[in-house]
Image (cartoon, grey):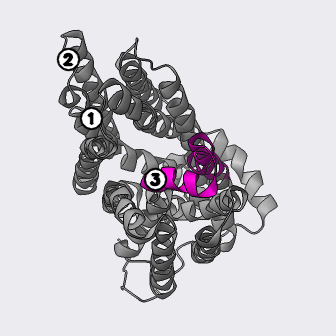
Amino acid sequence: MTDTRFLDRRSPPHIVTLVAIAGLSALTMNIFLPSLPSMAKDLGVSYGTIQILISGYIAVTALIQIVIGPLSDRFGRRPTVIGSLVILLLATLVCMVATDIYTLVAARMLQTAVVTGIVLSRAIVRDMVPMEEAASMIGYVTMGMTIVPMIGPTIGGVLGDAFGWRANFVALFILAALVLALVAADLGETNHNRSASFSAQFKAWPGLLASPQFWGYTAVVTFTSGAFFAFLGGAPFVGATLMEMSPSTLGLQFIFIAAGYMVGNYLSGRYARRFGTFAMMLAGTIMLIAGTLLPILFLLAGASSALAFFGPQVIVGFGNGLTLPSANAGVVSVKPHLAGSASGLSGAIAMGGGAATSVYASAILSVQTGAMPLLLVMLACGVLAIAALLFLHYADKSDSWRDDER
């Protein structure tokens, strides 16, 4: 592994810094979720209108990931991360003082620059270590950042109750400033094979896009995370409407899938190098399917309790935690000199697919159908992830990514 020295910008970044930039991305997404109703009331808009702060954010995030990779491949990881954090700080400052929905939405869309932390944390890891070790390190980074979505909404809810919704953006501004200081002191440049120009870089893209391995790994990421996005889209309806849970009780149910995801990432970090990326992805997708089949069987048997539906989601999260670090390591290993571009493009595809899955899962649910359609969508994602793995396994072994790995 590449030698790292903490708070030394002449060496590659410490894993703490990678966790910080990835975690900040997750926090920006969800810290203010409990305050959405009060934000809508304060700005004089409907709850449906204020939801664009989430749906619009996801859509712009998918698009911006395509740009982040090429920027970092051309100019380097360090300046791209620093630039994105500066944009986040300015956008968050506007969110803090916004007095109308239009200003808030515009600033919120600019906040998507922070997704650089997730995209480039993977590319930076691949710059530093070989593929199998990259899967392990990505697992640890993801495990660390998973804590954020578990506690972010809780912290945001407390801040909102005590000081109002703007306090969420004040806290985000302070944390972003701290992360920027950490990045400036610790994140040494890891991209030592930069593209000569954007045109030269995009000329190299066809080789990436023509690689069956790239599409195989991207499909695994898309369908595996698609099950999670489907759950996010449909679970609020299941909990609030079908099971008549209060918001606080419903919020606690999301701990199941988040806790499973964190444990899966830990085990991925510990064992990916020993067992290999394919074995980790296969085990993870099998667990994903098991985690969706179990509540289906419970429903068919007449068990419709909250525990019967939400409890098995710990297995789904566990499966995702096993699969995604290895799949993402594979994405950035197809063409290591285009690791940033590969991470960004794959992330955009996965985010777009996940957003579509989330919308679809929430749209097909009704009181009459119950939770079954949501579980079937999640099961379909698991089956398609297995199909992607089989495609990946039997893809042309002479593809150039093998040469890059040597």
Dot 1: what SS?
A: helix
Check residue 215 in the rendering and tell me which mark sits there, or answer none. Answer: none
Residue 37 falls inside the magenta stretch: yes
Helix, strand or loop status at disc 2: helix
Q: Amino acid at mark 1?
A: Gln
- Residue under label 2, please give it: 298
Q: Residue at x 26, y 43 (%)?
A: 249
**In the rendered structure, does residue 335 fall within the stretch colored magenta?**
no
Q: Is residue 399 visible?
A: no
Residue 343, given in percent of the width and then of the height, sits at: 55, 53
CA gap between label 3 and label 2 equals 31 Å
Q: Name the residue beneath numbered marker 1.
A: 313
For the point 50% across and 37% down, the residue is 222
Q: Which residues are magenta?
A: 34-63
- Position in image of residue 98 (x %, y %): 65, 67
Against 140, is 94 above or below?
A: below
Which of 133/299 is in front?
Answer: 299
What is the CA distance from the residue labelled 1 to the residue labelled 3? 21 Å
Residue 223 x/y as whole percent: 46, 32
Which residue lies under the disc numbered 3? 33
Q: Which amino acid, mark 3?
A: Leu
Disc 1 vs disc 3: Cβ atoms closer than 8 Å?
no
Question: In the image, is 220 to the left or to the right of 261?
Answer: right
